[in-house]
Image (spheres, helix red, strand yellow):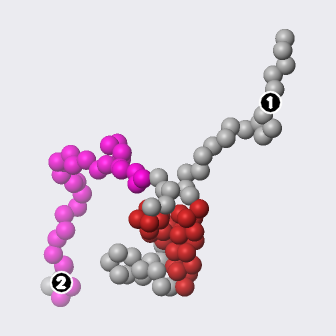
Amino acid sequence: MAARKKSSSGRKKSTRKYGKSASKRVASTMRRRKKGTLKSGSGRKVKSRKQAIAIGLSEARAKGGKVPRKRSAKKSTRKKSTGRKKTGRKKSGRKSSSSSK
């Protein structure tokens, strides 16, 4: 039997999902969020970490950085309108305490 030659690293080489420019852009948006100057599309202050990352990735995408495209919602996770009526209590008017003396 011939002995096989192993590669030096022993691992499968993988390509990066996100480029350097994308990670720099996300880091920049995270700093702006902490500083309090990061605004969303509607002009409101961003407080969420996840929203800040999404803004950074979309900025990197716009600049042409290596960023995977946005995922679309899966068919199974989309809300389906079944046309069923909601069951439960019906809301009634407020009861006045003066009439029950």
Residue stretch rendered in magenta on the structure: 69-98
Query: Which numbered dot is residue 96?
Result: 2
Asked if the residue under mark 2 is in contact with the one under mark 1, i.e. CB atoms within 8 Å, the reply is no
Give the residue at the far bottom of this rendering.
98
Asked which secondary structure carries label 2, the reply is loop
Report x, y in % for residue 60.
Answer: 47, 65
Q: Is residue 49 visible?
A: no
Report x, y in % for residue 43.
Answer: 35, 81
In which quadrant of the rendered image does the C terminus lie? bottom left
- Based on the picture, tell me whether residue 74 belongs to the magenta stretch: yes
Give the residue at the far top of this rendering.
1
Report x, y in % for residue 76.
Answer: 34, 42
- Dominant secondary structure of the magenta stretch? loop
Q: Which quadrant would residue 6 be assigned to in this image?
A: top right
Q: Which residue is mark 1?
A: 6
User: What amino acid does circle 2 point to?
Assistant: Ser
Which residue is drawn at the image coordinates 39% and 76% (left, top)? 40
Which residue is drawn at the image coordinates 17% and 71% (left, top)? 92
Q: Which quadrant would residue 64 be assigned to in this image?
A: bottom left
User: What amino acid does circle 1 point to?
Assistant: Lys
